[in-house]
Amino acid sequence: MVYLTVARNDKVTPWNKGKTKFTDPNVKKISDTFKTKRLDNFSKWREKSRVMGIIPYTTKDLVKSKELAFLIGLSLGDGNISKFPRTECLRLTLGSDKPRLANYAVEVIKQIFNKSPSIIKRYNSNCFNVTIYQKNLGKRLNIPIGARGSLEILFPSWIWKKKQYLISILKGLFEAEASYCVHEKTYTYNFEFSNRNFSLLNETEKALRILGFNPERRVTAVRLRKKIEAIDFKNLINFRVYP
């Protein structure tokens, strides 16, 4: 006698499979009801995912570190934060002649936000765009959103509490917008940070003086002109050197 085994599948296909609030009126009605009653059907899943590190906490303060100080400096020099309806965007525009700086910026951002930014070579200029999207970037980095030309820019208060943080934020600023020039025939040294924001120049000058240097102030720049100071500061911040 031959016995036949019949496979059974008791799983019922959900009625709303493949449907969205944009394609089905019943799904849209459910979605509207949840919004009206302020119900969050994914709250437990979202909290679990945050604990597991799948979803970042976008309201918590970032961990204070040398890397964060460096990123703030780099962002103030060559970055911009834009705001969108549901998120914010930090974009660093870094010269393609310094690919190691762009790659290092990617690693720093990944370490701070636990999220990999995109890095793209711009087709119309010699620059890399390093970009990350996340909520509350401006607030957590303490960087104004949008154009900063005439805004008052101050270093975060915690930066001033440790010498190493000051060194790191200055490294970010100088890596972004500084030039180191030596004219050997006249023994002339010039380590210059250029920017058009008056308050940012003030903060940079103040930080340099706290570290024991004597910067020369210009309308759009802060400069170290003494040979020993230019060399010492270059070595202090490891200018153009990345881990």
Image: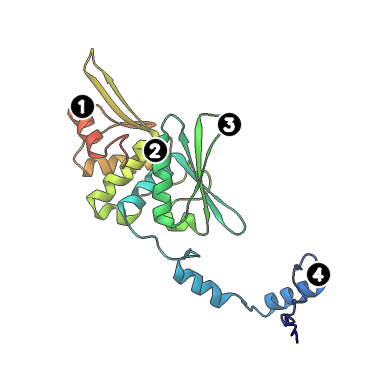
Q: Position of residue 133 (x, y in %)?
A: 53, 53
Q: Tell me the amino acid under the disc marked 3.
A: Tyr
Give the residue at x 43% y 65%: 60
Q: If you read the primary sequence from the N terminus, does the residue marked by circle 1 or circle 4 appear first?
A: 4
Q: If you read the primary sequence from the N terminus, does the residue marked by circle 3 or circle 2 appear first?
A: 2
Q: CA distance from mark 1 to mark 4?
A: 72 Å
Q: Tell me the amino acid under the disc marked 2.
A: Leu
The 10 Å Cα crowd at callout 4, few under 14, some 14 to 19, many 20 or more, is few
Residue 144 or residue 5, whichever sits in front: 5
Q: Quadrant of the C terminus?
A: top left
Asked if residue 77 shows in the view, the reply is: no
Q: Tell me the amino acid under the disc marked 4.
A: Asp
Front disc: 3 or 1: 3
Marks 4,3: beta carbons within 8 A: no
Q: If you read the primary sequence from the N terminus, does the residue marked by circle 3 or circle 1 appear first?
A: 3
The residue where tag 2 is placed is: 101
Query: Among all residues in the image, which is located at the extreme front?
Result: 1
Query: Among all residues in the image, which is located at the extreme right?
Result: 25
| SS under mark 3 | loop
Asked if residue 196 shows in the view, the reply is: yes
